[in-house]
Amino acid sequence: MGYRLGVDVGGTFTDLLLFNTETGSFWRHKTPSTPHDSSEGILNGVNAICDKAGVGASDIDYFLHGTTVATNAVLEGKGARVGLITTEGHRHIMQIARSFVPGGLAAWIIWPKPQPLAALEDTVTVKGRIDATGAEIRPLDEAGARAALTHLKAQGVEAITVSFINAYTNGSHEKRVGELAREIMQDVPVSLSHEVLPEMQEYERTLTTVANAAVRPVVGKYVSNLRDKLAIAGMAGKLSLLRSDGGLMSAQKAEEQPVNILMSGPAGGVTGALWVAKNAGFKNILTLDVGGTSTDVALIENLEPRRQRTTEVGHLSVRASALDVKTVGAGGGSIAYVPELTGALRVGPQSAGAVPGPVAYGKGGELPTVTDANVVLGYLPENLLGGTFNLDREGAKKAVQTIADALGIDLMAAARGIIDIVNENMFGALRMISVQQGYDPRHFALMGFGGAGPLHVNAVARLMGSWPAISPVSPGVLCALGDATTRMRTETARSFSRLAKDTKAEELIAILEEMAEQTHSELRNDGVPENEITSEFEVDVRYAGQAFEVPLTITADALREEGVEGILQRFDEEHLRLFTFNMDTPHEIVNLRAVALGRSLDLPAAELPKGDGNPAAAKMRDHTLWMDGKEQAAVIYDRAKLRQGDIIPGPAIVVEMDSTTLIETGCVATVDAVGNILINLA
């Protein structure tokens, strides 16, 4: 039998989901994360989930892992000290950067410019020059390169980046310096820009390669540590990590190019939602992943999540494919407060996190949070996780009362105010990925997951007009489900930079097929059989003179049939949708990309036994909650006992091991064939 284990490490909990690929049955487990060493929490979880399933670690064929190790290294400034080698005359490339200042008109006065990941004192130059066509104008000064590397070694750098002008057309100079670097500094990882990002735009290429170098030692140490501990536990299966774009990459590739896993964490939720949507028969989904600190939102159209060409982590924006996920500081631990100056209620982005956590958790938290407001209103029943986790409702009331006193209103109104504001924050994030990108949210269903997603999904669906509101099976471990059900993916890019009118379709096809062979061989080296690999192509197009481009997915067959004109027509349609106008300027083809994908797993979702529409067998007890300005009678149900076809009128609460679903007044929920709760307006 084949087993796949998905593991998602969050700030508070490590989620695990073990899948039997033959029967579709699965086991789930949540264990506290161990921030000092994530592998400890992972191993605790692996042992527990294997015991539950009655299998040994040696039975697991694939260990699939979403991690925020690289993200945290960047956010916390804990990346390696990077030595940067550039072309003579270009030493200040990281300091000059782009002339973009975030914020309003006065931002250039008050914006503290972030420190580059490679400091100026660790940046050296080497003579030698390649031109824009890839021809060598001046040979590489090898003696100068040796001297530069010896200087960086004395400086104590922990990683090396080589980024020469025009290296994307010809990487021979970079390759030679890389060889010298490995000779002079044997144990220091070397990142070459023409391997990490073979595209034009010197700053973006250098920044992306420097970011790759900065997180390489951190990710390398983490992966080798995890690999060793899993081997001790008896696991011989293949270790793969989730890429920012929702595909999988081998652990070895992740160690070499960790810039591709910077958004590995949030990507798991989107790939999990995709699997649920396929099995539930939905094509267009907005995702609402609500954790303890933040909410991640994304858009899936025709079962294809939107991707973007940049990965943003904090102030860092690197050129690497990622799912288009927007994050806001709104989660279960978000702290509510009333500033003296305005006297208006605010919620987040500050969070009580896992320590000390919400007041209701009884772990020493004192500040009122979203979770506390949910407890006060009765949306979160006092005993969670099957009665093993009791909430302190009196403590939560006391904390929320401080907000009520500051606003001069009663306790329940203050608690509901906190919930309304956090829902509006989530609504704002969802508008960014839908309305502001030219999509009508009324054409999408809204799926809420993460620990707190199903608590808020009904209210946010009302704001968005996105129905049904979906609470998937195992919403709390959906990211781990995503890790377990996605497929291998790799890509390569090449700058083309030519006017479309001077380009023939045959030229593009020849280059794309050459790139496809390169990506196929990468996946073959990762153990994917050739007959399971498929290719996709992307072309970046812009109007000549524009500073940004629009990526379009194409196939070689479509290119043969429709020619370059077909691409341009699609570009005009997409440009109009994104920006509401088109131009008469000639089109320019900027970059080409080839993507290779492994086989998509056809894992079935287990069907629930059929019910008669009456959920009485799942009823736990009657309950009272506060909604629409008054106390209302509600019912609490046990999700594990619901049957397909059960109809649950609101207000009601459905509890399970890893999450709680709230069905509001005026709404009704039905349980579908595979156990998803679909909430619609009554």
Image: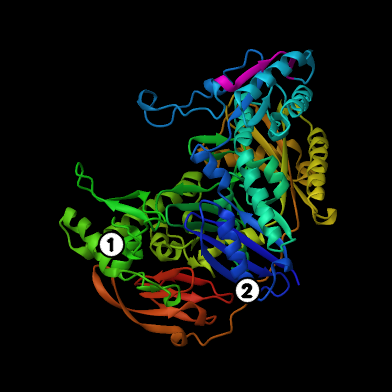
- Which mark is first along the chain, 1 or 2? 2
Q: Residue at x 70, y 32 (%)?
A: 190
As drawn, the label of residue 416 is 1
Q: Is residue 437 left or right of residue 523?
A: left
- Which residue is label 2 attached to? 51
Q: Amino acid at mark 1?
A: Arg
Q: Secondary structure at mark 1?
A: helix
Location of residue 144 (image quadrant): top right
Report the magenta residues as a range. Answer: 121-132
Q: Residues within 10 Å of mark 2 (few under 14, many from 20)?
A: few
Q: Residue at x 66, y 76 (%)?
A: 54
Location of residue 3 (image quadrant): bottom right
Q: Residue at x 50, y 46 (%)?
A: 438
Q: Amino acid at mark 2?
A: Asp
Q: How is the image coloured?
A: rainbow
Location of residue 128 (image quadrant): top right
Image coords of residue 137 (percent x, y): 77, 12
